[in-house]
Amino acid sequence: MRTGIGFDAHRFETGRHLVIGGVEIPHDKGLGGHSDADVLLHAICDAILGAAGLPDIGHHFPDNDAQFKNISSLDLLQNVCEIIKQHGFHAVQIDSIVIAETPKISPFVDQMKNRIARVLGLEPSAIGIKATTTEGMGFTGRGEGIAAQAIAMLTEP
């Protein structure tokens, strides 16, 4: 078994859709980034890549490459799965936390788990997604953006 940790953060930006965990969430702002800026999936991708001892998603999907402009992070996660399979690994469990004052993500957690599990070829019960606030402290507390952390467990088949 191998474990890896991932972290990501993005600023809010007007004129964009908010996508977290592969689910579009109603909100007055989205997250700014080259792709869809799905902070949760980016943290999960980095956790998976880290567990495999591989470079982060910025290495594999650079933000100056036009082919990744506005790409769905579910597609990035699928590509990460293919990359780790080439190195003899398979994801078996993910645990994560989204750090945001708003919006509340709990109504969307089951959808997120189902979408992530489908891409990883796992049961939704193998995906943990929690949410917390920073009680008004820091950039997430001031409503400037959202952050996420994830840990991944991989196994060799």
Image (cartoon, rainbow, N blue to C red):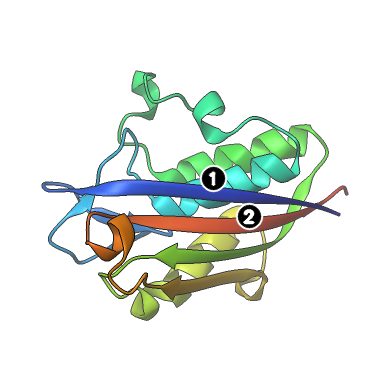
Residue sitting at x 58%, y 34%: 56
Give the CA distance from mark 1 to mark 2.
8 Å
Q: Residues within 10 Å of mark 2 (few under 14, many from 20)?
A: many
User: Is 123 left, or right, of 24 in this rendering?
Assistant: right
Q: Name the spot of residue 135 as percent of width and height, x first.
A: 32, 74
Q: Are marks 1 and 2 in contact (CB under 8 Å)?
A: yes
**Residue sitting at the far front:** 137
Dot 1 falls on a residue whose secondary structure is helix
The one nearer the camera, 78 or 19, is 19
**Residue sitting at the far top:** 65
User: Is 143 left, or right, of 87 in this rendering?
Assistant: left
User: Is 116 left, or right, of 5 in this rendering?
Assistant: left
Residue sitting at x 47%, y 42%: 75
Dot 2 falls on a residue whose secondary structure is helix
The one nearer the camera, 66 or 14, is 14
Q: Which mark is residue 52?
A: none
Quadrant where the N terminus is found in the figure: bottom right
Q: Earlier in the sequence, mark 1 or mark 2?
A: 1
Residue sitting at x 64%, y 57%: 151
Vertical side of 149 occupied by 112: above or below? below
Amino acid at dot 1: Leu
Q: Name the spot of residue 2 as percent of width and height, x first.
A: 81, 51
Vertical side of 36 occupied by 104: above or below? below
Amino acid at dot 2: Leu
Q: Name the spot of residue 36 as percent of width and height, x first.
A: 32, 43
Vertical side of 135 occupied by 16: above or below? above
Q: Name the spot of residue 105 as percent of width and height, x first.
A: 35, 73
Q: Which mark is residue 120?
A: 2
Q: Which mark is residue 77?
A: 1
- Where, by quadrant of the figure, is residue 53 drawn? top right
Residue sitting at x 37%, y 19%: 64
